[in-house]
Amino acid sequence: LLPESHLPRHKSDQHQHEVKAFDELGAKQTILSNGMRICWKRSDLLDDQVLVYGYAKGGLSQVVGSHCEEHSDGEPPYVPTVEEMQKYRTASVGALMAADIGIFGVKPPLLSDALAGVRVQISTSVKAYLRSFSGEQSSSDFETCLRLIHLLFSTDVKAVEEELKAIKQMAREAIQNQLRDPLHKYSNRVKWVNYGESYYFKSWTLDEFDNVDAHDACDFFSKCFKNPAEFTLVFVGDLDAVHNGQSDEDLLVLLEKYLGSIKPADYAFDEHVKGCISAEDVAPIPFTQPKEVISEVVLAPMVDPVSITQVTFPVRLSLDSAIEDSFWLIFACRLLETRLLKEMRFSRGEIYSVAVGPSFGVESPSFPMNVVRGDVAINFSCEPGGNAQPLVDLAIKEVLWLRGNPASQEQLSSIVAVEKRRHEVALEDNAFWQECITLAYQSRTFRKSKGDLDAAYLSRKNLRAKVLDAITPEGMMLRFQQFFKLKEDGGGADEDEGAAAAVPAPDQLLYTAITLEPKQLVDSPSSAVVSWLAEHKVAVASALGIAAAAAWAVRTWIAMDGKDTAGTNTHSDSASNGNAT
């Protein structure tokens, strides 16, 4: 892969680099000759592991973005023209088609053969607000990783005519499978309802796919990874074991050789933005939050019948206090999940799993409304046949109770203790430090401090500690009043502080409740399925519990400080999308 004779002529050892050290993070930063920003942290937490993450702001929302910036709160979302929608559809399948052709200039089967015996992994992602690539490498194979990154930026993915028919057919079958998948149908409906029928969450039709131009789709993908000056790369791990990388000087020569030699593109990713896309330039997805209570049941054929429900509460945070509020919100969700699990699972035995978590993945890092809009979702699964609605009512009553009554100190102390233990374990993981650095780069504090990565890291660290020390029963009750609004509250300021209040009626709380139920029981009568579920409840509960944990990990809010993520999941995550407030 990429012999040295094929590298552009580039005197990598003659470039002078200004290196900034960030002592609190134990990281260093420099800018390569082509404008690519590099940050690295040497770590001995795990031998022979180096993590890489590279990102640039701007993604799929830029395709229709220039028309969405005039959207204001309370108005219906912008509806793209047929031509704009077709461009968006074309761009959204670019990564899928490019992966089948070969994003590194080599067909996937040949690449697998070339990397046999080598521990290198680089995967790409193009989301609403972010383009990124990431992977885990062996320290001894670090140079191969750099070669793949060079190939990613220097390759123009081209759809070969004789292969195009097969590639489009595979992509078409993938979309057909999605359209048949009951979970996909349910996920789309949840997002469609909770984000005001935004075009970004509109379901595909096969006619739309048939009109996709594969050449344009591949061109869009190539354009996503073309200009090195737009990208920030973060390396964390056992860099001391990298061949020719033991010292920072040697490492810089290696980085300059493979990454600094990437030629800058002669065009911009977004023609409406001069230069690199900043957080303020990111085009927002036009969406609105629900104003009334919405309750729906989605029916879909299933082989293994199960009922899945998501109860979603729209949330708004002040931009100035968003990080601190986000920590409060995370702990509030953990309290609510603990209480629901105790009541629904252990006391009543009526659910397989339950998870509660926040998401701000659809909010743009440009924050067009000058607030941070998101939601909190309660997800649970249970036996089909009308069991979901009483559990929805129970969840609503629990939220209302917590709005008006302080939780026990014992419960809060347990949550704080578990959180501190989780943090202690995370400190021993390279992925945690990579995330800390990425969040710091994407934060508003980093931009305000003119590039002080330590200041951004310490700001978030200190706010987390402040919230943990401030958690009290009365304080948590007030936060529930702030986050879980009544319909007459609107989206504005917090309620008046006070003692425990009378519990409002359930229909006063603003939420949506969407339930997936089997349309018909395939291959077995309903009574047989229900009996089977009753007999195997423990096994099913265990399996769905793992699924719930995975769902929580996917949608957990990686950062509200400005990280870009936009919703491909039922409850979209904001960390991978770039709106780390």
Image: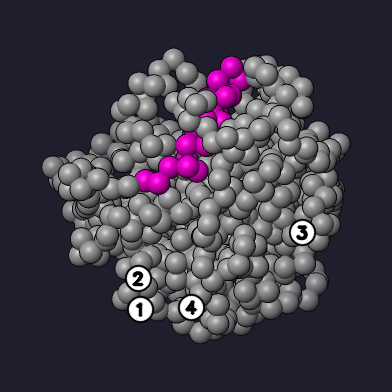
Q: Which residue in the protein does label 3 denote?
A: 447
**Residue numbers of the magenta segment:** 136-157
Give yes or no for residue 556 being in the magenta stretch: no
Residue under the image location 59 percent in, 57 percent down: 57
Q: Is residue 431 visible?
A: no
Q: Which residue is mark 1?
A: 81
User: Dot 1 surroundings within 10 Å: few (below 14), some, or many (20 or more)?
Assistant: few
Badge 1 amino acid: Thr
Q: Write down the residue under mark 4.
A: 67
Q: Is residue 376 left or right of residue 457?
A: left
Q: Residues within 10 Å of mark 2 (few under 14, many from 20)?
A: some
Q: Position of residue 476 (x, y in %)?
A: 74, 58
In the image, is 79 to the left or to the right of 59? left
The residue under label 3 is which amino acid type? Answer: Arg
Q: Nearer the viewer, residue 515 or 328?
A: 328
Residue 85, disc: 2
